Image (tube, grey):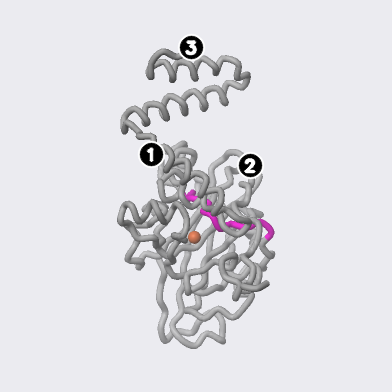
């Protein structure tokens, strides 16, 4: 199609869709082009702004490494990750769900841990946390034999993949639920943490005068054949940034109830000071059991290594 005026461009691009054999690919690409062109018209994107946008997209790739996924990070900060999650879980977005963003820090191959075991693989100071989880179906029946991957940041706010001082796979572990659907572990109470701001996500947050923190949370990935795999996060009810999560991940269903214990004996004899307990139940829906592609593949290297 020969283009005469700006209105013709959208029609020309859509006309070329007719050769696309896969109907879903055709649907996605057609809608993407219609919305992208409508957006450009709505804001009357200037040539200078177009160049800037291209620069941001190039930078998303350039900031992505085997130990950091800038694309996943900005998807969270634009609300895209949680929108996709909530549309596809909780009876297709009609009910509350335990599902939440996978986030940029899940790694495959975490070490297997016995129920009740520790996630600490190198000294990690902080308040002891004893977690008990239950995996169940929508009727409350326990789901035995579910694989549960757990990961969280250290009390200084760094995941092991970001921090060469932590041991490989520190604060990560994989559990299997018992006959009653339960699993449990010992760790340290996580703190909220800043997301990296040296790339395009930082530029976005600065442009909007937003802070770059996430409220404290634990991550889970729960997998059992016959049920829809979910990623989940359980947030600390005492975190001051629950309402302003820079990744828009906090939902009402996922605010956990950490209980502080002082002067009571802990489940482990070596715990001296105050400690925390947390119980949480995860509901799985029937559906496709699949594992997502890990957003990162390895730990950051020590300086000079
Ligand atoms: Fe996280």
Q: Is residue 280 left or right of residue 123?
A: left
Q: Secondary structure at mark 1?
A: helix
Q: Residue at x 47, y 28 (%)?
A: 32
Q: Residues within 10 Å of mark 1 (few under 14, many from 20)?
A: few
Q: Residues within 10 Å of mark 2 (few under 14, many from 20)?
A: few
What segment is highlighted magenta in the picture?
Answer: 98-109
Q: Ligand 1 closer than 8 Å to the CB at disc 2? A: no
Q: Is residue 274 left or right of residue 167?
A: left
Can you identify the residue that label 2 sits on? Answer: 226
Q: Which residue is more in the foreground, 233 or 270? A: 233
Q: Is label 3 or label 2 in front?
A: 3
Q: Which residue is more in the foreground, 123 or 206? A: 206
Q: Main secondary structure of the magenta part?
A: loop
Can you identify the residue that label 3 sits on? Answer: 2
Can you identify the residue that label 1 sits on? Answer: 48
Q: Which residue is more in the foreground, 94 or 302? A: 302
Question: Residue 40's quadrant in the figure?
Answer: top left
- Furthest residue in direction front, as rendered: 48
Report, in whole angstroms, how far the alpha carbon at label 1 lies from the one at label 2.
51 Å
Q: Residue at x 55, y 22 (%)?
A: 26
Q: Residue at x 43, y 64 (%)?
A: 194
Q: Is residue 45 left or right of residue 19?
A: left
Give coordinates of residue 12: x percent, y percent. Answer: 48, 16
> Which mark is first along the chain, 1 or 3?
3
The relative height of residue 110 versus residue 126 in the rendered view (above or below) is above
Q: Is label 1 or label 2 in front?
A: 1
Callouts 3 and 1 close, C-beta under 8 Å: no
């Amino acid at each position: 199609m020969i283009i005469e005026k700006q209105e013709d461009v959208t029609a020309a691009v859509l006309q070329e869709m007719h050769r696309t054999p896969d109907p879903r690919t055709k649907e996605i690409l057609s809608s993407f082009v219609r919305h992208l062109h409508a957006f450009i018209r709505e804001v009357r994107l200037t040539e200078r702004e177009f160049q800037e946008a291209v620069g941001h997209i190039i930078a998303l790739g350039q900031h992505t490494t085997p130990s950091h996924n800038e694309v996943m990070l900005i998807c969270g900060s634009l609300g895209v990750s949680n929108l996709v999650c909530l549309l596809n879980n909780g009876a297709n977005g009609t009910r509350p769900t335990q599902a939440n963003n996978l986030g940029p820090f899940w790694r495959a191959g975490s070490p297997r841990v016995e129920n009740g075991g520790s996630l600490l693989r190198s000294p990690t100071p902080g308040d002891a946390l004893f977690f008990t989880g239950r995996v169940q179906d929508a009727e409350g029946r326990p789901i035995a034999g579910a694989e549960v991957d757990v990961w969280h940041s250290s009390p200084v706010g760094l995941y092991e993949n970001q921090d060469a001082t932590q041991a490989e796979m520190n604060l990560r572990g994989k559990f299997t639920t018992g006959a009653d659907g339960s699993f449990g572990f010992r760790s340290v109470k996580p703190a909220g943490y800043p997301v990296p701001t040296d790339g395009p996500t930082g530029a976005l947050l600065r442009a909007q005068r937003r802070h770059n923190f996430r409220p404290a949370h634990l991550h889970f990935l729960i997998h059992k054949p016959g049920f829809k795999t979910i990623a989940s996060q359980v947030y600390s009810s005492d975190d001051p940034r629950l309402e302003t999560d820079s990744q828009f991940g906090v939902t009402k269903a996922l605010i956990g109830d950490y209980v502080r214990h002082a002067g009571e004996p802990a489940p482990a004899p070596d715990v001296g000071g105050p400690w925390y307990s947390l119980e949480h139940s995860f509901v799985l829906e029937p559906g496709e059991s699949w594992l997502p592609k890990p957003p990162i593949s390895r730990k950051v290297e020590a300086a000079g290594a």
